[in-house]
Amino acid sequence: MSASELATPTAAARTAAADTLVPVPGLVRDIGLLLTRVLLGVVLIAHGWEKLVTNGAGATGEFFDSVGVPAAQAAAVFAGVVELAGGILLVVGLLTQVVAALVVVVMLGAYLFVHQGAGIFATNGGWELVAVIALAAVVFGLVGPGRYSLDALIAGRRATRS
């Protein structure tokens, strides 16, 4: 990507800037998306690692069973893989919208089976963390990963071949 391409806002960035009270330059927006995407990915990697490695899928499945998750063993593996592999994919910005949808499904399950009745605060087992993770995933699903991602690199290569 050339320096002029980095400095020139895309049509989408110009439209998004026009819809805000205080316009944010495209470069700042993309750096913000990168940092947010990487942080979300790291949080997901940590949770997936905990489910699959630290606790192990078996123990995670036993916990899932104790809270009434259907097909608890399969759900434990699914949640762990979505979080671990999905977190890695978010860090590099690959398959972002697919990962976002899967993360929302996992967080919805976490809310419904574990956190729903515990109030809002995570310190009391509440739902605030799963809600923030789900909402961040929704944002990436809607706006994409930003310019500094493998998704953008692949899309740019496709566009130049057309």
Image: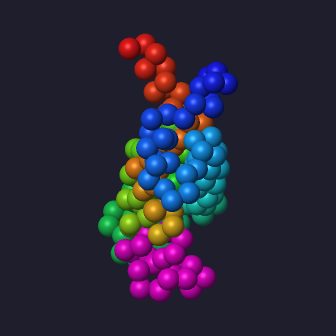
Between 20 and 103, the residue placed more toward the observer is 20
Examine the image and state in which quarter residue 108 appears. bottom left
Examine the image and state in which quarter residue 114 appears. bottom left
Does the magenta stretch mainly form a helix, a strand or a loop? helix
Residue drawn at (46%, 62%), measured in percent from left and top?
135
For the question of whether residue 89 can be seen, the reply is no
Residue 46 relative to residue 79: left or right: right
For the question of whether residue 138 can be seen, the reply is yes
Quadrant of the drawing holding the N terminus: top right
Residue drawn at (47%, 69%), measured in percent from left and top?
131
Q: Is residue 65 magenta?
A: no
Residue drawn at (46%, 16%), measured in percent from left and top?
160
Q: Which residues are magenta?
A: 110-130
Residue 99 placement (x, y as % from top left): 44, 47
* Image label count: 0
Quadrant of the drawing holding the C terminus: top left
Residue drawn at (36%, 70%), measured in percent from left and top?
69
Outermost residue toward the left?
A: 70
Between 103 and 49, the residue placed more toward the observer is 103
Residue 9 placement (x, y as % from top left): 54, 35
Relative to 97, say whether 78 is above or below: below
Between 21 and 36, the residue placed more toward the observer is 21
Residue 37 placement (x, y as % from top left): 58, 50
Residue 81 placement (x, y as % from top left): 49, 50
Q: Is residue 123 magenta?
A: yes
